[in-house]
Image (cartoon, rainbow, N blue to C red):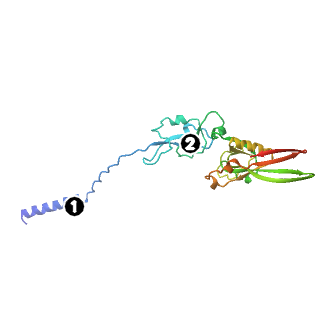
Amino acid sequence: MNLARVIVLLVAVLAGGAAAYMFYQPSEPAAVVEAPKVEGPKVLIAKNDIPIGALVTAKELEWMPWAPNAPTGGFITLQNRPGAMEELRGSIARMAFVAGEPIREAKLIKGTGSGFMAAILPSGKRAMSFEISADTAAAGFILPNDYVDVLLTHQEERTEGKKRESTVRTAVILSDVKILAIDQTIEEKGDSRVIVGKTATLELTPDEVNRLSAARRTGTLSLALRSLADANKPRTEGEAKGNRTEVNIIRFGVSSSNVVE
């Protein structure tokens, strides 16, 4: 074999080896181009569970980044109200918040130094309590925030000559009224589904307060629990005003009349 052929063969071997080496070398990963980060607004949320009636402090609140395209209607954002934590300090929760829930001012009442019940009452409403028992309150299944009808049961006595008749009558005097509390319980506790209390506190108009006050003196009051399906139905005029009930009471031969409208 002459020298020229040896050189050609050697060059071919070297070229093949170089090609094989380059083929089996791991390729470098393609550069990853990160998409620009789009930050959403920061929304004020409840850091911990806030029960109804609790005083709100800064430690119960925090700012949380929100999804860029998620709706924020009704929420408090850092961009719009950077001082919201300080502004809301001392407010009272008129509805409960769960941890992570956005804060809505509609569920808060600014503390004014008054009691909690006075703070949560809507304008123009009154809170009035009366005695109840398991027999007169649906066996304890009536809970705060339920809606009820109030019934009056009374004994009506009539005298015709020497004959005296006694009749027991029942009528609905208030309809579709909200239960604010049973005793001092203002919300359902945990898994409890029954509260057997001694007093019920109702949310009433001034006119309804007058009717309930008159009814308490004339007979026995009881509560009838309304269905949740009635919650969104508009109140009719009859429901708003209740039924007119005239009670005639004869004591020691003297007749007196009480009208419960």
Q: Badge 2: how crowded within 10 Å, few (<14), some, or many (20+)?
A: few
What secondary structure is marked by label 1? helix
155 left or right of 186 in image: right
- The furthest residue to the right: 162
CA gap, disc 1 and disc 2: 74 Å
Q: Position of residue 183 (x, y in %)?
A: 72, 44
Quadrant occupied by the N terminus: bottom left
The answer to the question of whether label 1 and label 2 lie on touching residues, with beta carbons closer than 8 A, is no
Q: Position of residue 85 (x, y in %)?
A: 52, 36
Residue that appears at 84% across and 54% down: 167
What secondary structure is marked by label 2? helix
Residue that appears at 44% across and 43% down: 41
Q: Which amino acid type is shown beneath numbered disc 1?
A: Ala
Q: Which amino acid type is shown beneath numbered disc 2?
A: Ala
Q: Badge 1: how crowded within 10 Å, few (<14), some, or many (20+)?
A: few
Q: Nearer the viewer, residue 6 or 212?
A: 212
- Upstream in sequence: badge 1 or badge 2: 1
- The furthest residue to the top: 113
- On residue 106, the disc is 2
- The furthest residue to the bottom: 1
Q: Nearer the viewer, residue 178 or 41?
A: 178
Residue that appears at 86% across and 51% down: 158
Q: Nearer the viewer, mark 1 or mark 2?
A: 2
Q: Which residue is mark 1?
A: 20
Q: Does residue 255 appear in the picture of this structure? A: yes
